[in-house]
Image (tube, helix red, strand yellow):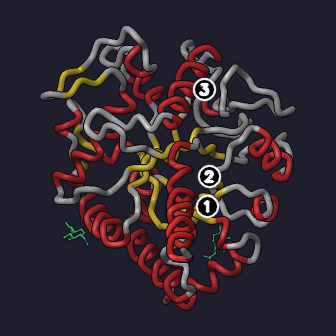
């Protein structure tokens, strides 16, 4: 009988461990001078039933607020620290993790460390340090007995693809392969995900002739793109499957994809409206909740982190960059979206 109980207990654990793949995550950027306190942000997430958050930096003034919130954390290792982490040995990486992260938040609450954000796209100075830094941090996690618990990867812009249409023709930019191949090797060996930031909004505004708004916005009447036996009705799915195809082209099958940022702004462009943001983000939440998967991998859940918790008034670039927030500063929603 005790064996039966143990089995039931293990089954419950396995279920718990996999049960959050239908939960949406939210990114919490803090590039603003009017933002609520980190503690208020953590309460807002909790009160909306959001149990996963991506923090871009291991900010010592932010992490403590999330330590006791019961929220699973994805924490960024800043691009600026990759040089140090690549050249240091694993002992120094242990010290770095302790003094920058584990002092403020228990490793128990951390699910992912995102080592570098869009380095190959906008911070190429650090490209050569990326994989060595990941390897050192991995060794550090092994030394701490945390390598199974905390997964390591790096978040890429979808521009790592040089070809994405149709999705089965997905291929990585050849110039990036010297970094991407050893990284894929690492992800494959350690059972870690490939992370991508993808914004159909940007694809649309950069090329409105070839990217119909309906296709970017999960429109019910979007013309579908045929790709062999598969049909695509939205750019979100097409991008994920193009990444999967690109990885398979390099010989890597079965590496899961996590969307570490996606979203739709509510101001700063004619199609940046609350109505469109409600449609886009609402569809993403619904698809995650129902574990829809993609045409190539139906029913295989894709973990997604929506960008962004609040508007960030100090963001540079186009005006819309400041307006990805889903919640107002007072905690009300900018538009109707159901996270329950
Ligand atoms: C990490 O980067 C920050 C700037 O983002 C810098 O102040 C700090 O000295 C760096 N630490 C190490 C160990 O490289
Ligand atoms: C990926 O990992 C699996 C399991 O460890 C291994 O059998 C396979 O050869 C790896 N693939 C590549 C391309 O390295």
Dot 1: element: strand
Q: Residue at x 68, y 43 (%)?
A: 50
Q: Earlier in the sequence, mark 3 or mark 2?
A: 2
Judging depth in this view, the residue of 300 and 202 nearest the camera is: 300
The quarter of the picture where the C terminus appears is top right
Mark-to-mark CA distance, 3 and 1: 23 Å
Labelled pair 2, 1 in contact (Cβ < 8 Å): yes
Q: Earlier in the sequence, mark 2 or mark 1?
A: 2
Labelled pair 3, 2 in contact (Cβ < 8 Å): no
Residue 30, how many percent across, how many down?
72, 48
Q: Residue at x 42, y 47 (%)?
A: 196
Q: Residue at x 43, y 44 (%)?
A: 302
Answer few, some or many: residues within 10 Å of disc 3's Cα (few below 14, many 20 plus, some between 14 and 19): many
Position of residue 58 in the picture relative to residue 294 (left or right) = right
Dot 3: element: loop
Mark-to-mark CA distance, 3 and 2: 18 Å
Task: From the image, tell me which residue sits under label 2.
Answer: 54
Q: Quadrant of residue 181?
A: bottom left
Task: From the image, tell me which residue sits under label 1.
Answer: 75
Judging depth in this view, the residue of 235 and 119 nearest the camera is: 235
Task: From the image, tell me which residue sits under label 3.
Answer: 265
Q: Residue at x 73, y 63 (%)?
A: 59
Answer few, some or many: residues within 10 Å of disc 1's Cα (few below 14, many 20 plus, some between 14 and 19): many
Q: Is residue 224 above or below residue 110?
A: above
Q: Quadrant of residue 274?
A: top right
């Amino acid at each position: 009988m005790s064996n039966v109980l143990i089995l039931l207990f293990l089954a419950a654990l396995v279920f718990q461990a996999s049960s959050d793949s239908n939960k949406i995550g939210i990114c919490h950027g803090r590039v603003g001078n009017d933002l609520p306190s980190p503690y208020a942000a953590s309460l807002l997430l909790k009160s909306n039933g959001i149990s996963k958050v991506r923090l871009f930096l291991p900010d010592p003034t932010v992490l403590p607020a999330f330590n006791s919130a019961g929220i699973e954390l994805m924490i960024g290792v800043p691009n600026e620290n990759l040089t140090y982490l690549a050249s240091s040995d694993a002992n120094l990486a242990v010290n770095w993790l302790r003094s920058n992260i584990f002092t403020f938040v228990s490793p128990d609450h951390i699910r992912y460390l995102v080592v570098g954000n869009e380095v190959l796209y906008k911070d190429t100075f650090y490209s050569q340090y990326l994989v060595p830094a990941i390897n050192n941090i991995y060794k550090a996690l092994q030394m701490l007995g945390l390598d199974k618990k905390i997964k390591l990867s790096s978040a890429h812009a979808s521009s790592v693809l040089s070809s994405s249409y149709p999705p089965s023709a997905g291929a990585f930019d050849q110039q990036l392969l010297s970094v991407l191949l050893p990284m894929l090797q690492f992800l494959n060996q350690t059972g870690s995900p490939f992370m991508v930031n993808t914004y159909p909004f940007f694809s649309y505004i950069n090329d409105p002739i070839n990217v119909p708004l309906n296709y970017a916005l999960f429109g019910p009447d979007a013309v579908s793109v045929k790709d062999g036996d598969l049909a695509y009705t939205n750019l979100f799915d097409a991008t994920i499957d193009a990444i999967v195809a690109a990885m398979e082209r390099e010989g890597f099958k079965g590496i899961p994809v996590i969307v570490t940022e996606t979203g739709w702004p509510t101001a700063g462009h004619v199609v940046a409206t609350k109505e469109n943001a409600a449609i886009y983000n609402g569809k993403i939440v619904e698809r995650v909740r129902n574990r829809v998967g993609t045409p190539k991998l139906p029913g295989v859940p894709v973990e997604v982190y929506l960008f962004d918790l609040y508007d960030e008034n100090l963001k540079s670039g186009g005006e819309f960059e400041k307006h990805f927030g889903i919640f107002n500063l007072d905690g009300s929603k900018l538009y109707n979206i159901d996270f329950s």
